[in-house]
Amino acid sequence: MEYHGENFGGTYEFRCKKHTEDFIVNSHLHEYSEILYVDKGCADITIQNKPCTIPEKHLVFIPPNYVHQLNCTNAVTVCAVFSNDFIPLFFSRLGNRFLECSPIDFSDKLHLIENIHLSDADDCLLISGKLYLICDEVIKKSCFSSSQPMDSTLYQKIISYLQNHYSENITLKKLAKKFGYNEKYLSSNIHTLTGIHFTKLLAVYRINCAKQLLNNTDISISEAALSSGFSAINTFNRVFKNIVGITPTEYRNGVKKSN
């Protein structure tokens, strides 16, 4: 799970790309809105822990702070990520409703989406107009809920904090106290949103750090364990194998062979 900090706090930021080859993004969330359109084939996506398949000529609108992951291995896709100041009226129209993300048929509105990746990122008025026309279709063709699935804004804070402090002595109790939430409430939200418990979420961040160290440095495995937040080498070895599938030594030897 990652928090994409580059998609935060910007003013009229627009990034869009057409992907003709495999396009895979692991589970993440960010402050910006996102649109994924499938031009050819079909794509698999998971949003708020709910998987779905996007057919050809369909798109999904992903609101801010919705956890999602993409697996577009057999598709040509267009992915746009943009700051929310492009479409303030869209969010105003939503009011107290929450979007239930599902594929929307755009076969009759292809002119709105097919070439959006060719837009000049500095032409804010044109981009805003295109996005509003797309959002109009989203509102017409989507279902809505009156209750937010979970406190994903809180989760954004948690993920951001973990990314910057995973090597420290973090516990769920300390985290709950820091952000002023009940420990059980925080634990339940994290598990509902990600499908895993807090201890494993923290372990994933630490193991990813250790993998980078084993990949790119010559430090010992014990040093990699300590640098990534583990206090005992036995615990590190066990958790590493549980998450990666092989031991740290086997992982490092495999990296050396591939190089």
Image (cartoon, rainbow, N blue to C red):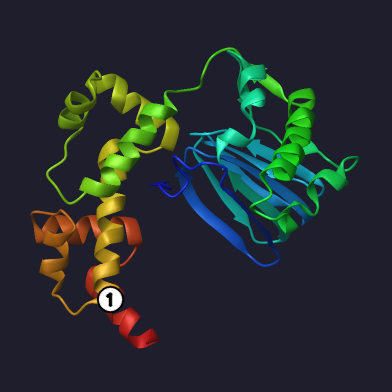
Dividing the picture into quadrants, the one containing residue 186 is top left
In the displayed structure, does residue 148 sit left or right of residue 113? left
Residue 141's quadrant in the figure?
top right
Count the numbered circles shown.
1
- Residue at label 1? 216
Say few, some or many: other residues with alpha carbon within 10 Å of mark 1 (under 14 / 14 to 19 / 20 or more). few
Relative to 183, is 242 above or below?
Answer: below
Q: Position of residue 225 (x, y in %)?
A: 15, 62
Identify the image quadrant of residue 198. top left
The three-letter amino acid code for the residue at tag 1 is Asn
Q: Residue at x 14, y 61 (%)?
A: 227
Toward the viewer: 190 or 168?
Answer: 168
Task: Give how far across and how far down residue 163 sits, in percent.
Answer: 29, 48
Q: Residue at x 77, y 28 (%)?
A: 136
Q: Residue at x 19, y 62 (%)?
A: 237
Q: Quadrant of the C terminus?
A: bottom left
**Secondary structure found at label 1:** helix
Q: Image height check: is 146 above or below 62? A: above
x, y percentage for residue 35?
A: 66, 43
Q: Residue at x 87, y 47 (%)?
A: 111
